[in-house]
Image: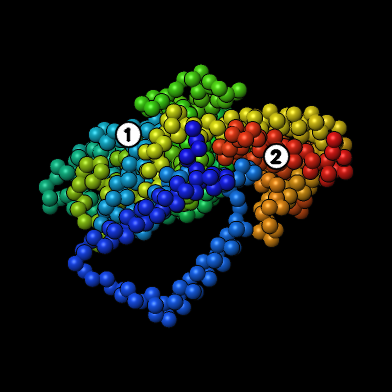
């Protein structure tokens, strides 16, 4: 039963949302009036009659009405006719919780500014950790930790920041010549510890330091701090440790552009990002193994290997299990690095794989009711999430929550001590050692200096109303995956219907709830012409603020397939299916659109794409519409 979860494509639940907003706005006003009821009202009751007051109200109403009118040109994400980018209707629990919290305006950097919502944000991190298979018991020393960000991009920055701090810290301990610790024999070994070993060494250092006399504690702390990469900067750190090279980040070629931005931001440089080829639209584990072996031979450190759990372009799932296996293998060979999963899109699909007690569901349990989902490789990838070091998840994508709500989660919270910043006017007691007290000073550990407590309330309440398991929240992604399977089957029927008019194919089976469609007019063998045709189709599907929304029957998006991502074999397979000549795929120095294949991309988030109440399949309607437009553009009469 999903009927109460959203405002609805037709605004069906407006009464419920209106009741909630009015109820809690009044409740907020009562809270203000009862803070110190002996204080008289500062704004007199007759102020509303003053001409200036009325003039202000008039201006306010005028501007708000103009804004409201302008917003009617917004993209209708709420509609099942929208199947474009990664956006859909918003869950009522999150929307109402965010509205409720906004007037309180908490700033989730410390409990001084957000005594309530900062705890909710810490709980959100634990909720997501449980969904991913990370330890979520705060009594465990290795309990996971997570926090919200403005989006997946900042969460990926935080992953880089934490991995770099943990990688360089053992080198700082050696440089400071700290006695009494089991330090690695040389800088190479220190710089190439695995994350678990680095965290263990950090714990030894903290325990050793706590045992020193008070007069020596500050001296040793400063001695180590002065040798840390964060203090010296990238240039000076590597100048002092000339045997070390700047570490690489290894990621699939389909990785989000935030990884390039992050490496630039941290000063590592875009040159340190190595993009690896795909195999079957997933990271090529063999290519990763070969690259890691080359790094080991050449003594080239690796900071992190990134795998993607639902690419933003295709929704495909990388072999997380193979990546963590390779991490363990090369760790034994002396090449340690972190494994981060960019699950900005696919993170909430993990609810399909979790029981209410947090245990993993078997593949046969997950498969019940689906035609193909999940493939064994996909199930293995989700099953391996608990072995990774950190994950990015976006509640504002498949969590159906307002922008901006991304999240970063690390498997072992102890490493975050290396990120701590102090500010006396914000953070007071630095002696707290228990988990919850520590993270009430959240601003010490996160990239932002200010962050919305309302967003934390929205995510927390949603997760409480819809726990992150298959029986609760999982009902939503279940609907979307079923829609993807229905879309795939209907697209194959469209290919038969358009036989002799256009070649239509789904270039690769969907791993999740994104489905791509490739199209080429019959008789055409030239890639650039095929791309021009698909772009004409997309022009009819994209948002256009200059036209009334109602003129659009459906909204879709597009992307491209490139040989450097697919590999020559896969690219040629798809071109052959479309009857395109691979020889027309050429380097595109003149931007002639001939170095890639343009395809339509469909994000199937809306749970009402198949409207059982009214017996309507918007998937069928869309593909019938697409077939008509293909025929019209090619001058072929509709049947």
Residue under the image location 61 percent in, 53 percent down = 75
Mark 2 residue element? helix
Q: Find numbered disc 1 in the image and state the secondary structure of the residue it sits on.
A: loop
Front residue (pair 379, 332): 379
Q: What residue sits right under mark 1 in the picture?
A: 136
Q: Upstream in the sequence, badge 1 or badge 2?
A: 1
x%, y% of residue 67?
A: 55, 65
Question: Taking 223 as reference, is 67 above or below it?
Answer: below
Q: Which mark is residue 235?
A: none
**Neighbours of disc 2 within 10 Å: few (<14), some (14-19), many (20+):** many
Q: Which residue is drawn at 21% across and 51% down?
A: 430
Say which residue appears at 77% left-offset and 49% top-offset: 536
Colouring mode (rainbow / by chain / secondary structure / one colour): rainbow
Taking depth in this image into account, of 370 and 240 the one nearest to the observer is 370
Q: In this view, does 588 lie above or below 71?
A: above
Residue 40 position, x and y percent, is 23, 71
Task: Say few, some or many: other residues with alpha carbon within 10 Å of mark 1 (under 14 / 14 to 19 / 20 or more).
Answer: many
- The residue tagged 2 is 622
The residue most toward the bottom is 51
Q: Is residue 468 above or below residue 590?
A: above
């Amino acid at each position: 039963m999903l009927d109460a979860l959203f405002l609805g494509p037709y605004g069906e639940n407006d009464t419920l949302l209106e009741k909630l907003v009015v109820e809690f706005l009044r409740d907020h006003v009562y809270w203000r009036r009862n803070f110190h009821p002996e204080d008289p009202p500062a704004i007199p009751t007759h102020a509303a009659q003053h001409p200036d007051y009325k003039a202000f109200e008039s201006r306010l109403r005028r501007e708000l009405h103009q804004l409201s009118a302008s917003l009617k040109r917004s993209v209708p994400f709420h509609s099942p006719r929208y199947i474009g980018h990664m956006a859909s209707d918003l869950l009522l629990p999150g929307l109402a919780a965010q509205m409720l919290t906004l007037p309180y305006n908490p700033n989730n950097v410390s409990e001084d500014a957000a005594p309530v919502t900062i705890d909710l944000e810490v709980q959100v991190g634990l909720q997501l950790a449980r969904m991913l298979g990370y330890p979520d018991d705060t009594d465990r020393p290795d309990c996971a930790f997570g926090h919200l960000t403005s989006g997946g991009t900042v969460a990926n920055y935080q992953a880089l920041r934490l991995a770099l701090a943990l990688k360089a810290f053992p080198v700082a301990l050696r440089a400071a010549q700290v006695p009494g610790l089991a330090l690695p024999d040389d800088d190479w070994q220190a710089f190439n510890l695995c994350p678990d070993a680095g965290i263990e060494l950090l714990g030894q250092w903290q325990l050793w330091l706590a045992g020193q006399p008070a007069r020596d504690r500050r001296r040793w702390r400063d001695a180590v701090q002065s040798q840390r990469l964060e203090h010296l900067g990238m240039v000076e750190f590597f100048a002092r440790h000339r045997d070390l090279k700047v570490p690489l980040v290894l990621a699939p070629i389909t990785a989000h552009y935030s990884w390039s931005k992050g490496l630039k931001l941290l000063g590592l440089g875009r040159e340190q990002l190595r993009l690896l080829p795909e195999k079957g639209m997933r990271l090529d584990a063999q290519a990763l193994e070969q690259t890691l072996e080359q790094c080991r031979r050449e003594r080239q450190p690796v900071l992190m290997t990134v795998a993607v759990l639902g690419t933003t372009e295709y929704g495909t799932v990388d072999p997380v299990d193979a990546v963590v296996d390779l991490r363990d293998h090369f760790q034994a060979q002396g090449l340690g690095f972190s494994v981060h999963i960019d699950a900005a899109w696919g993170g909430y699909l993990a609810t399909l794989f979790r029981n209410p007690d947090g245990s993993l569901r078997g593949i046969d349990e997950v498969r019940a009711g689906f035609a193909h989902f999940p493939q064994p490789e996909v199930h293995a990838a989700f099953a391996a999430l608990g072995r990774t070091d950190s994950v990015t998840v976006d509640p504002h994508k498949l969590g159906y929550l307002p922008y901006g709500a991304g999240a970063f989660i690390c498997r072992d919270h102890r490493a975050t001590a290396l990120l701590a910043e102090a500010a006396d006017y914000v953070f007071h007691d630095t002696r707290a050692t228990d988990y919850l007290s520590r993270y009430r000073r959240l601003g010490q550990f996160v990239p932002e200096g200010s962050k919305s407590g309302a967003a934390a309330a929205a995510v927390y309440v949603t997760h409480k109303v819809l726990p992150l398991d298959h029986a609760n929240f999982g009902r939503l992604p279940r609907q979307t995956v079923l829609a993807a399977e229905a879309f795939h089957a209907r697209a194959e029927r469209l290919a038969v219907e358009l036989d002799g008019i256009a070649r239509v194919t789904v270039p690769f089976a969907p791993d999740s709830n994104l489905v791509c469609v490739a199209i080429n007019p019959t008789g055409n063998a030239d890639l650039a012409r095929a791309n021009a045709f698909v772009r004409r189709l997309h022009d009819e599907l994209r948002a256009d603020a200059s036209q009334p929304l109602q003129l659009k029957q459906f909204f879709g998006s597009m992307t491209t397939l490139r040989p450097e991502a697919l590999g020559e074999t896969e690219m040629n397979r798809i071109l052959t299916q479309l009857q395109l000549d691979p020889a027309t795929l050429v380097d595109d120095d003149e931007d002639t659109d001939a170095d890639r294949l343009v395809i339509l991309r469909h994000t199937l988030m809306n749970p009402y794409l198949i409207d059982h109440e009214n017996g309507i399949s918007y998937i069928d309607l869309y593909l019938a519409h697409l077939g008509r437009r293909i025929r019209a553009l090619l001058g072929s009469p509709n049947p």
